[in-house]
Amino acid sequence: MKRYNPSEIEPKWQATWEEQHVNEVTVDPSRPKVYVSGMFPYPSGAGMHTGHAFSYSIVDALARFHRQHGRNVLNPMGWDTFGLPAENYAIKTNTAPAIVTAENIANFKKQFKRMGVSIDWSREINTSDPEYYRWTQWVFAKLFERGLAYQKESLQWWCPVDKTVLANEQVEGGHCWRCGSLVEKKSMKQWFFKITEYADALLDEIPDLDWPQKIKTAQANWIGRSLGAEVEFKLVDSKDIITVFTTRPDTLFGATAIVLAPEHQLSRQLATSEFKEAIDEYIDSSIKKSEIERMNDTREKTGVFTGSYAINPASGEKVPVWVADYVLSGYGTGAVMAVPAHDERDFEFAEKFGLPIVEVIEKPDTDVDTRVYHGEGLLVNSGRFDGKSTSDVREEIVAWLEQQGTGRPKVSYKMRDWLISRQRYWGAPIPIIHCPDHGPVAVPEDQLPVVLPDVKDFAPKGDGKSALASVDEWVNTTCPTCGKPAKRETDTMDGYACSSWYLLRYADPRNAERAWDPAIINYWEPVDYYVGGDHAVAHLLYVRFWTHVFKDMGLTDFKEPIKKLVYHGYINAEDGTKMSKSKGNVIDPLDVIEQGYGADALRTYLLFMGPIEFDAAWDSRGIAGIYRFLNRIWVLAQEYQDSAKDFDGNDLAVKRAQHKTIRKVTDDINRLSFNTAISSLMEYTNELYKLKVDGFSKVVWHDALQSMVQLIAPFAPHMSEELNSQLGSTELVQNQPWPIWDDSLIAEQTMTVIVQVNGKLRAKLVVAKDTDEAQIKQLALEDEHVASFIGDKKPAKVIYVPGRLVSIVV
RNA sequence: GCGCGGAUGGUGGAAUUGGUAGACACGAGAGACUUAAAAUCUCUUGGCCUCACGGUCGUGCGGGUUCAAUUCCCGCUCUGCGCACCA
């Protein structure tokens, strides 16, 4: 009898699949398509980790399951290669990032193949390949044409010693992470994508997405749409007007101050000579503070009076104008009306600086404990609106303001435009040429790609520009519009740009004429299952944004790129904590395979650990258990081959187990419940072990084992393929139809009806399937044990749930 | 603070529509095979009472609805995650 030896059979079948190109697919309108993809990996030097192994075990189970159903399955792979880790490594070792990246990709690819993931490698893409980023640049140019990419001055972190821009996370407590010097904010021109223009469109589609609720909620909160009003406050001693945004126009009569963000245009200007110095000092210092510091909840409110006053358009009262950094410049108008009586933040501010607190909503008696009442109620101190309820009066007050020209309805979003430019070398160059006469001009399509030039030193030079800026022969070019000397944009794109359309490129990856052929895209897309475990908002919102734009451009038939988002948990170390190199508790999936467990056991184990959306802790005994399970199937198949005979054995029982399992596994995989699918295969195996003592009847057992082989294939494809061939099939497993169950074989002639007395289980009746209600009730009441609990009391009620139970109430 | 989840044996988890709680696996215990061990196979395994039949308690805590609640409702506790001065 042959022993189960994964390290022998797995490479063998991997080679066969590769030789026969079994996973390469083309458009085939005669068959339903299924597109499944994991989030493409960033190929780091460390190689694949358990998270990758888990993600792609899910992807591959789905891909194989659908392929076995005869569907045309697209399961592609690519590499997200631009970004800081590769660039920093390049700076440190003075090796071109492209070279390091190529090595890492080769390593990852080898590992994916060793996992047996059924990828169509003919579609492999790499975001740092000019043939790919050519089209990323093309998209940029299209967005620029449509006014969806624009340049704007914006404040950035600047280290005056290193003379470089720093990302938010490179600033630690107001100091540069490298040299420790105090950083400052510097205004620089940056590129943005106008995602805010799609705020409503992106929000509107959320309810229809088949995505986990928590991701949908996170996206909706991130977009943060709120309906409110803009209200104008005229200044007392100047012609200037301050416009505020509020979601509570009903509290307007309680606005006792105006507070400006330090960055507000008028904040310096409104300072009267008496307060000028204090205001300037305050604004200078607060602009230096990190957003994280400014948004710190526990920090005490600060602020400075400007000396100016404005008029509350509702009450006509004179209210002071202050500058305070608790007001955010990026949201609404960067100015708020402070209503201390009904807003916690304004209350703190007013309390600290002695501003008047005017209640305009009657606090319900039930809410005496609340210091600041922000609920609904009846208006007081609100002139003609007194006695009306807050929720009713909002629109009315706005309409009243609108009549006077001092207010209007307004929708605000938390979401800001997407800052896309990076002053870094290792990214897709922004395809823009700056012409002295024509300003920024998009590089024409026939001149794409703008290829990243070779440089000697990848580090930023210290002038706030990427290393590209020092390549004179690259920077100096001519204007596409007028032909006069002009300069290339030296910023590169955020890596998220590259990953915002790769799911589309997979469908038509070798197209040299255009980004994609709509006919091909519309066949494969949208993605049916997108599998991943991070990126709640950023990537998953950007992909949606770009796809919406593509639809509007007529480049696709669909708005939403991802039908179902399969969001999985993390695999933690054995002690339940996160795996980390420094703790030395990292499990390397390739080690597990090479220890002799094999890829099949690894994959099956990862899917058996629990529901995919849960975090799980690696258990080295758990994988041993799975190996044992696979081995039991193997042994069963070997014993069958050694001793099957022509006779009628336990045929009916074998068939029943077989068909029950087919139904359960099919059901469970369809609802992505892999752990229970595997457990039912375990039950099936245990059942067959009990039945085998009566011998293997040739035909029925062959059929039962063939089903086993096919049902286990999504999890343990190599063993499945080997046993399939041992059982005499000349077709690969994926070319054979998924087994179909027969309900009549599952059905039993008897049913078990449980009997409850006062809600407690007292007996189980095994009765013929066709026993009628009256007979069953009779049997239940007559049951000796049941009777002893009823005693001489009269049953008040007897409830019968067909085929399930009799519930007796006494 | 706001939002979204989660809590079931020694452990991971199952119970899909309110209907036998603990499937399956790990661990533990016992037995078979073996000179022995490993491997493998079989059985037992939520707590308490009972030789046993069986009883009783039990799904984070407190209430409620129901013939019946892990499942639905109300109020808490703990915990994970996301957002966080968004007016």
Image (cartoon, rainbow, N blue to C red):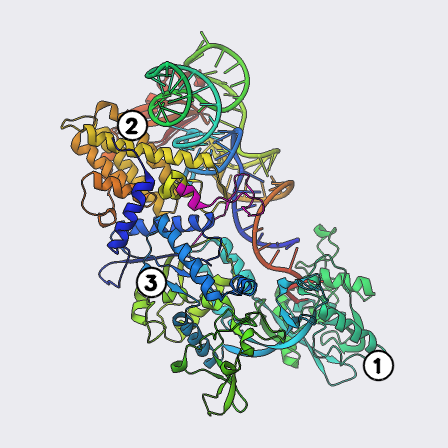
Find the magenta span and give its range: A566-594
On the picture, is A305 further left or further right than A92?
right
Q: Which residue is mark 1?
A: A273
Q: Nearer the viewer, mark 3 or mark 2?
A: 3
Q: Which residue is mark 2?
A: A689
Q: Give the amino acid type for the residue marked by disc 2 in the picture.
A: Tyr
Chain that bears disc 2? A
Q: Which residue is mark 3?
A: A123
Which residue is found at the position 38% from the left and 55% from the top?
A109
Chain that bears disc 1? A
Q: Position of residue B80 (x, y in %)?
A: 58, 47
Q: Give the amino acid type for the residue marked by disc 1 in the picture.
A: Ser
| Residue A124 to residue B20: above or below | below
Q: Nearer the viewer, mark 1 or mark 3?
A: 3
Dot 3 falls on a residue whose secondary structure is helix
On the picture, is A562 further left or further right than A718?
right
Q: Is residue A571 magenta?
A: yes
Chain that bears disc 3? A
Give A724 or A762, whichever is nearer the viewer. A724
Residue found farthest to the right = A274
Quadrant position of residue A677 = top left
Dot 2 falls on a residue whose secondary structure is helix
Q: Position of residue A674 (x, y in %)?
A: 38, 43
Q: CA distance from mark 1 to mark 3?
A: 68 Å
Mark sitting earlier along the chain (3/2)? 3
> Can marks 1 and 3 be said to lie on one chain?
yes
Give A128 or A456, whichever is nearer the viewer. A456
Q: CA distance from mark 2 to mark 1?
A: 93 Å
Which quadrant holds the N terminus of chain A?
A: top left
